[in-house]
Image (cartoon, rainbow, N blue to C red):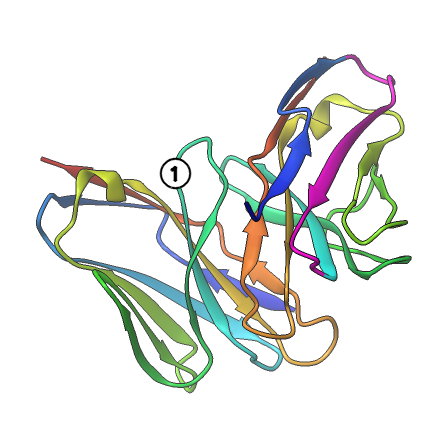
Amino acid sequence: GQNIDQPTEMTATEGAIVQINCTYQTSGFNGLFWYQQHAGEAPTFLSYNVLDGLEEKGRFSSFLSRSKGYSYLLLKELQMKDSASYLCAVRGAGGSYIPTFGRGTSLIVHP
Amino acid sequence: EAQVTQNPRYLITVTGKKLTVTCSQNMNHEYMSWYRQDPGLGLRQIYYSMNVEVTDKGDVPEGYKVSRKEKRNFPLILESPSPNQTSLYFCASGYPLDTGELFFGEGSRLTVL
């Protein structure tokens, strides 16, 4: 099975940088995903990492270290609209290739 | 517009009264899935389907049924709802064997009294 751990809640200031960590233990590994979910809305896809390193997409970047079972989502130049829950999901190898979601990190951005 | 559509969006029902939440996608995805989301527990998978007529249990299948008779539709059936099934439900579709990106419906908030 898979075990995914991420902080429950984080706060940050508008314009700042925040890093949301995700650690995982999984039997096999076949990709890590980050999703954003605003309150009461559907999750939306942010990023996908399958190899070690940093993937940058505008203000958002995602990093993966497979040997450490570790990923982070980096949000730069924070805006109020970035207040949301950020879900880390891991896909194991073999079987159904279905990703398992962590419990999510609620990010609060204040002025 | 590419989308996943769920109905109803909101429903209040009583214990034991059978209900169905419909899910339809127009992206020709083979994979579809149902999740429930509860405070502090995150997204938990109920059932998923890799293709027409192929369904499998997720992590929390008890009390639910699904069917996949057509590629675009994946209804979730609660034969005898109970209060512990009060939750926010999401349907999703995508290509799990490729990038793994999932497209979610807007959610169905179900309350069982």
The x, y position of residue B43, in whole percent, is 57, 47
Residue lying at 57% horizontally and 74% vertically, measured from the top left: A26
Q: Quadrant of residue A29?
A: bottom right
Q: Amino acid at mark 1?
A: His
> Is residue B108 found left or right of A95 in the rendered image?
left
Q: Is residue B18 above or below residue A81?
A: above
Name the residue tied to disc 1: A38
The x, y position of residue A110, in whole percent, is 14, 36
The x, y position of residue B52, in whole percent, is 86, 58
Q: Residues within 10 Å of mark 1 (few under 14, many from 20)?
A: some
Identify the magenta region: B14-29
Residue lying at 58% horizontally and 45% vertically, measured from the top left: B3
> Is residue A67 found left or right of B43 in the rendered image?
left
Residue lying at 57% horizontally and 68% vertically, measured from the top left: B100
Q: Secondary structure at mark 1?
A: loop
In front of the other: B70 or A31: B70
> Is residue B49 found left or right of A55 in the rendered image?
right
Question: Considering the image in quadrants, where does the C terminus of chain A appear?
Answer: top left
Question: Considering the image in quadrants, where does the N terminus of chain A appear?
Answer: bottom right
Outermost residue on the front side: it is B1
| Residue B16 lies in the magenta stretch | yes
The x, y position of residue B16, in whole percent, is 87, 18
